[in-house]
Amino acid sequence: MFFGEYYHSLDEKGRVILPVKFRDALADGLFITKSFDSCLLVYTRKDWFERVDEIMSKKPATAEVRNYQRFVIGSAVEDEVSRQGRISIPQNLRDFAGLDRDIVIIGVANKLEIWAKERYERFIADAEKSASEIGEEIADIGV
């Protein structure tokens, strides 16, 4: 399980050193894809294939489902953790998420999120402003 918030930097080739505590879980390989929150998602191989099965089990009859399949699965890349503990993020995914130099890696249970530092800090500041409203909404759905 992934959790925590880690500040890192991309090198000039789009590589980032992963926090040590995440490396073992990703040792068998990983998948990086787009998120609707303008960040990137990183899944273990096992969790990725479970996610793909879940996505593909939906009826592709609607344009929304097909577009979601294209967005999430079509943009995914497979990678592995290097001996130095790094992963490589392709340019198209860096562009999508606005990743330049400073990034934040967030552990969110079964996946990691990779954010541009400035984007993440704005997101968190907005979330903190509406924390009580978020708490009420979550309570309404039983979380």
Image (cartoon, rainbow, N blue to C red):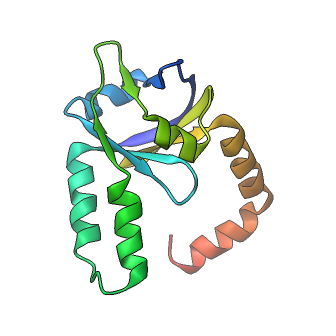
In terms of depth relative to the viewer, which is nearer, 139 or 86?
Answer: 86
Left or right side of 56 for 136: right
Residue at 71%, 57% (x, y): give it: 127
In terms of depth relative to the viewer, which is nearer, 124 or 88?
Answer: 88
Residue at 27%, 29% (x, y): give it: 80
Residue at 59%, 36% (x, y): give it: 99
- Residue 22 image point, x, y percent: 36, 30
Q: Is residue 49 visible?
A: yes
Residue found at the far top of this picture = 84
Left or right side of 50 for 107: right
Residue found at the far right of this picture = 129
Residue 20: which quarter of the image? top left
- Residue 58 image point, x, y percent: 27, 78
Quadrant for the N terminus in the image: top left
In terms of depth relative to the viewer, which is nearer, 91 or 87?
Answer: 91
Q: Is residue 69 above or below residue 58?
A: above
The number of numbered discs placed on residues in the rendered structure image is: 0
Q: Is residue 106 visible?
A: no
- Residue 43 image point, x, y percent: 33, 45
Residue at 47%, 24% (x, y): give it: 16
- Residue 39 image point, x, y percent: 54, 48
In terms of depth relative to the viewer, which is nearer, 108 or 94?
Answer: 94
Residue 7: which quarter of the image? top right
Q: Is residue 99 above or below residue 60?
A: above
